Image (cartoon, helix red, strand yellow):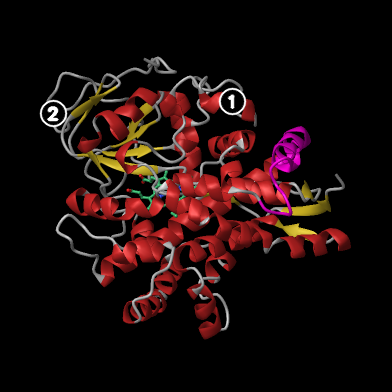
Amino acid sequence: MPKACRTLTANPIMPDTLESTTALPLPPGPEQPMALDIDLPSQQAISRLLTQYGDIFRVRIPKRKQATYIVTNPDAVKQILVSNHSNYIKGRGFERVKMLLGNGIIVSDGDFWRRQRTMIQPAFSRKHIHRMNAMMQQVTQQLIPRWQHKADRHEALDISTEMSEFALELILRALIADDLDTLKQTCGENPFAFLTANPARNLAVAMKFRQLAPLIQSVIDRRRKHHEHHTDLLDALMYATDKQGKRMTDKELMDEVMTMIIAGHETSAGTLNWVWYELARHPQIEARLSSEASSMVHDGGIKIDDVTKLAYTKQVINETLRLYPPVWLFTRKAVADDSLAGFHIPAGTDIFLSPFFSHRDPACWDDAETFNPERFANDGKHLKHKYAFIPFSAGSRRCIGEYFSYIEMQTHLAILSTQFSLSLLPGQHIKIDPGINLRTKNRIMMTVHRRQD
Ligand code: HEM
């Protein structure tokens, strides 16, 4: 049994009668109400409060009836996500996420979520993802001529935009395969391109995004009319059936497709952006990653069986996900009373879980701020606590795209790292921007070099 990395030392507050009927104390926390959202001031506030109160504390958020708890204690995280997961629903969450995703699988709950998850899961089987690997290679290889051009002319490369465009193209092709070309022709450009050009995720962007639903609907209608079959995610979703043998309605299908676009785009884009940044800062790690790939990449391509053997590349990806988890904060709501790490959790409590802070907890990680892929050697067997590393969440609501994104990122890094090395343009101060996803505040500019070896 792994032990909690941290022993709770904070002074507990006894529960007031309004919030609790049990004898256990409530977690400590500031008395003054404070706003918490997905933004930098909130992230800074959480950081201060974790230091002050420990790995489970409560805050009063204006306009919310009950206190919100922030939890990074790994035993409590395990209880919320795994051992007592049925007591913790998605709950209210963040309105901005709902605006983008409708009632897609990320935000839905209960029987409806279970039905959707069961129907969608086969589309993410290893077999199905392995079949998409040729597409993943092609989308990666499309970058090569531009990077060569930049290298030869010593022109700067905006790696953040490159990764955003790459991941968008890849998730769209995973979803609708060559129908993406038809949409590009009809619209004169990739109609989803504004997602990479405009980093904001506000109401205007959400509206624009949702207005693209008819384009996806036109693909669905045409495929149905001609009884077409493809090896893409849309095909799997269109023909998936529930226990009663029923398919998704068009509205359900649309919410899930739109969910996949958002969930699969920014997460992989952000992670790869940070991987290239850390590789540029650590030439020895970069050399080892490239050397691992070079024995497996032939003629600019790599077999899927070899992609799954890229152990060190996976360590680098994991260490990047540790320091820069794209989903840096997510929420749950307690359905019934519970106790977590010795504290009382009243029914209805909103809970914030934060991969970002769990992953940097000095009690769980030695030299927590240092980029060191070695900690994930041997498949992370030596981690102090399994639930101190939750970039994809855990339990039944774990990310459905986890394996997909490892294969995507390993393929991408293997092919490109054998041809290029990147270095940071001097004079940049890279800062994090914690929005719906954890991104860089400014785009990262790189110099590209062709590899001689
Ligand atoms: C580096 C890549 C990724 C990371 C770090 C990541 C992270 C996460 C996290 C933390 C959650 C749980 C959120 C919560 O419970 O509130 C989640 C859920 C989800 N992710 Fe990912 N994700 C990644 C890539 C992808 C990709 C590529 C796809 C689709 C192609 C995807 C689709 C989903 C879906 C559909 C869910 C909801 C699952 C459910 O609630 O049943 N993700 N992801």
Q: Which mark is residue 315?
A: none
Please name the residue shown 15% across and 28% down the image.
20
Please name the residue shown 38% across and 55% down the image.
123
Foreground residue, 450 or 328?
Answer: 450
Please name the residue shown 51% across and 62% down the image.
200
Residue range (magenta): 279-301
Give the mark toward the camera: 1 or 2: 1
Q: Which mark is residue 17?
A: 2
The magenta stretch spans residue 376: no
For mark 1, does the 10 Å Cα neighbourhood hold few (<14), some (14 to 19), or many (20 or more) residues? some
Mark 2: amino acid? Thr
Report x, y in % for residue 31: 32, 32
Please name the residue shown 26% across and 28% down the image.
83
Report x, y in % for residue 378: 56, 24
The N terminus: image quadrant? top left
Position of 61 with respect to 198 (left or right) is left
Dot 1: what SS? helix
Q: Which mark is residue 377?
A: 1
